[in-house]
Image (cartoon, helix red, strand yellow):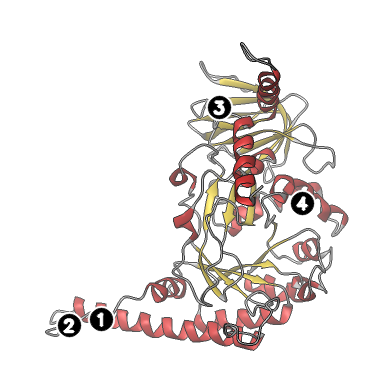
Amino acid sequence: MNKTIRNLLTSAVVLALAPLPVFSSGGNLLIKNGTILTVTKGVIAKGDILVLNGIIRQVGQDIQAPAGVQVIDATGKYVIPGIIDSHTHIALDGTNEGSEAITPEADVGEVVNADDTAILTALSGGVTMVHTMHGSANPIGGPNVVLKMKWGRPSEELIVHEALRTLKFALGENVKQSSRTITVGGPPPRYPQTRMGTNAIIRRELLKAKVYMEEWDRYNKLKASKTPPKNLLPPGKDLRMEVLSDLLRGKMVARCHDYQATEALEFIGLAKEFGFKVQAFEHAWEAYKIAAELAAAKIGISVFADSWAYKMEAAEGIAYDAGYCAKKGVLVSINSDSGERIRRLFNEASKTMKYGGLNETEALSLVTINPAIQLGVDRIVGSLEVGKQADIAIFNEHPMSSYTRCDMTIIDGDVYFDRGQYLKEREEAAKQAQAPKKGGRP
């Protein structure tokens, strides 16, 4: 069977078996009698959370439901903030514009795919928000986008406008196309082909952006003067330079794909040279070697919990990377970089308790409040606090347990995933598929 047709059929089956797009409570509900892991305000046994209009209004015990508010019984279950994935590529129609090395004008926010079934996969693991990104084919990729996992809603409703604007950079083997086979008579290799070339091409583009920005500043100053010159013409618009100028002006922050400590230090040097902010390094398998430098520069890391040594530049990665860096004061988040691993980020976070000695709250922070801080949304999500948006996940056991599962995922006070309801609908669909048709065979 043609691969494209097979993928379409698979998607159709998943969609047919999926729960309704949203079990709407109007953003009003009361979660009762759960063990509430607030992340930032401790643990509340037999606790309640009152949500009104999608916002957490009360967190405590013995809270009474106002008239008409739906009650969710969480007895024996654990209630946590919605999980946040700080680095993934789901819900996009394209992640790499690999035809050229420098493509900051290519914005993934323009191609959000709200029909990607990976959104439902994410919800089944308690994930409510993702930072979905450019790939790592380009030294300078383009703007990324932060989404809420509102399955069944239009793409415009998924975008989180409160988040920091982030620009993807990449270093290492991918941008220098280490895996590419160069054939005689074939197309010439794309520049850069070395790590020194990668550093050089990024510096070259930032210098161009600096000059571009200065030209526009000079023009705007003359235009606003009391006696602007006659026949004053603006500089030509350049979409690439517009984005890089926003970075240099502090309107965007850098998120940089990186493996080796040496290249991370080089990129930190570029940030100091041009005055832009590095918000986080992605993957960062050798971050443990430069934990002190990262902490001093207030640069976070978004990493895997394990899976090290899968290629040469990850050869010196260690299982203790995340836990060690967290202990050294680096802001650490655990990411999926996957449309499948995303459903078990809580399991990934729990590995840092073994490899790194983090406690339960510290480990849970790696997929809740820490990525929220990295994305600039900690004022609205990332912990269960009054005034924050009601992005909540309910688990049948402690989320750091190997045996736990997510039973319910709530975004802005509406239930977007209900495992019990999903199983009922799947069972009903199976019965209908097996039932004999009128006037025909089963």
Mark 1 and mark 2 residues within 8 Å of each other at the beta carbon:
yes
Mark 1 and mark 3 residues within 8 Å of each other at the beta carbon:
no
Q: CA distance from mark 2 to mark 4?
A: 57 Å
CA neighbours of label 3 inside 10 A, class few (<14), some (14 to 19), many (20+): some
Residue projecting furthest to the front: 440
User: Where 321 sits versus 289, above or below?
Assistant: above
Query: Could you tell me how many numbered marks the image carries?
Result: 4
Q: Residue at x 57, y 43 (%)?
A: 149
Residue carrying label 1: 219
Residue carrying label 4: 349
- Counting from the top left corner in percent of width and height, residue 334 is at 71, 56
Visible residue check, residue 384: no
Residue carrying label 3: 23
Q: CA distance from mark 1 to mark 4?
A: 51 Å
* Tag 4 secondary structure: helix
First of labels 1, 3 by sequence position: 3
- Counting from the top left corner in percent of width and height, residue 22 is at 54, 30
First of labels 1, 2 by sequence position: 1
First of labels 2, 4 by sequence position: 2
Q: Quadrant of the C terminus?
A: top right
* Tag 1 secondary structure: helix
Q: Amino acid at mark 1?
A: Tyr
Residue carrying label 2: 232
Q: In this rendering, which labeled residue sits more in front, label 3 or label 4?
A: 3
Mark 2 and mark 4 residues within 8 Å of each other at the beta carbon:
no
